[in-house]
Every structure is written in C-alpha cells, then in structure tokens.
Image: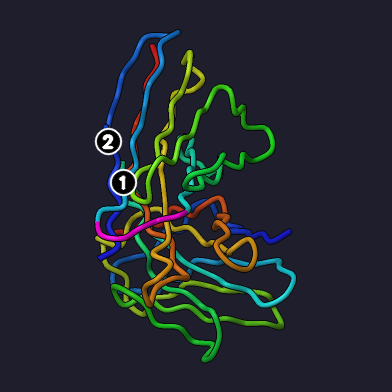
Amino acid sequence: GAVVSQHPSRVICKSGTSVKIECRSLDFQATTMFWYRQFPKKSLMLMATSNEGSKATYEQGVEKDKFLINHASLTLSTLTVTSAHPEDSSFYICSARDWWSGRADEQFFGPGTRLTVL
Amino acid sequence: AQSVAQPEDQVNVAEGNPLTVKCTYSVSGNPYLFWYVQYPNRGLQFLLKYITGDNLVKGSYGFEAEFNKSQTSFHLKKPSALVSDSALYFCAVRRGAGNTPLVFGKGTRLSVIA
C-alpha cells in the first residue's frame, strides 16, 4: 500500500517551453502532497506543499509563477515548470502521506522525474 | 525551526563491518525523526522512524537507529554492512505537528567496499 507514482520519469525539453509533471497516489487519498527538488549530489529541497482544492503553499525563494502546482483531486497533483531554462534542470520528487493509515507519520515518495532543459 | 544535520558527506566501510551514519537534530518540542535511503535515480525509501518509546528503533534491511535526547542525535547503524547497502542516506525531521512536510539533512553517501 501507499504507492506514489510520477509521470514522466524523464523529460528533455527546449529552453522556453513548459513541462508538466504528474504525481499520483495510487492506493490512497492524499489531501496534501509535497514537492521537492534535488540537485545533483545534494539534498532534497522542499519547494511547496500542495493542498487539494486550494492554493499551494510555496517555500521561501521558490517562484510560484514559475512552478505552478495544481492539486485537482485527492489522488493527483501536478507541477508545471513554465518557461523552463537550463537552471531548472533537476530531479523533482513528490511525496504524500496516507493520513488515514497506520503509517500516517511517514511520507511516501514518488520515483522522481528527471528534467533536462536544453 | 526544525532541522537536521548530517556531518559526513561520505562514509566508507568494508563489507561485513559495522556502519554508522550520523545525524543530529534541532527541534522545538518532541522530535519526529526519520531515515530514508535513495538509490541512483530513484525516489526515497523509508527505513525507520522515531516518534516515541524505545530509544533503539529497528527498521528495514537490518538497519537500526538510536535516539539520544541528551546528545540530540539519531545515528543510523547496521551491525554488518553489505555492498548492496551502498546508497545515499537521508535523515529527516517533521517540520511541525500535523500534516507538515519532512525537512532533510544534506545526505550521506555510504560506500560499502567488498
């Protein structure tokens, strides 16, 4: 149980284009999902908290107009990188809690999406 | 603010030897502490957690961690390392009560040498 998927696993795009990354909770409902960004050989940086049916809460220093988050349902959150530039190249990971299970303290992570902007 | 620190970027250990990956924390209130492991180009996998109770926590793949309140530490340990344990290990703390996110240490790369 508590499986989180991401799609795509890998994407290469041209500079200036937009890319959408999907995060799904496959066997549980997630009112809240978290988006992280991981730079090579570095830690995970929390980008934002995605709330179902409401606006995302962004961490300080994260551009909300560049990283658009939509949490349209209890099982889907999307991260859209708008007007992508090479410096946006990174590994993006989403996460969620299965709040109604016996493992509510844990966060379950998706497999990540490798974004490369040329 | 809640935070964790992993003082070592890299830990090397010979296969069969015990391993320790260090983590110290800074929290207000009761700490909710976690260890995750990441294999190349993969998401994070949960290893173990400390919420309350016994200071020695046992987790997946033979790993354990000891919560030490006086030293504000939560070191990850394994009695006998395997080559397959080579990965990136993250210590994390929950940022607050309720459905708040985990914040992570910078990670420690463990290399187990045959």
Left or right: A61, with B44 as reference point: right
Residue B98 in the image: above or below residue B53: above
Quadrant in which residue A117 is drawn: top left
Q: For the image shown, how many numbered marks are present on the structure?
A: 2
Task: Please tell me which residue is depicted at 54% across the width and 58% down the height of the picture.
Answer: B102
Q: Residue B36: x percent and y percent? A: 42, 61
Left or right: A55, with B11 as reference point: right
Q: Nearer the viewer, residue B55 or A8?
A: A8
Q: Residues within 10 Å of mark 1 (few under 14, many from 20)?
A: many
Q: Quadrant of the C terminus of chain A?
A: top left
Q: Residues within 10 Å of mark 2 (few under 14, many from 20)?
A: some
Q: Residue A107: x percent and y percent? A: 43, 61
Which residue carries the number 1 mark? A24
Q: How is the image coloured?
A: rainbow
Task: Please tell me which residue is depicted at 51% across the width and 91% down the height of the picture.
Answer: B54
Circle 2: residue type: His
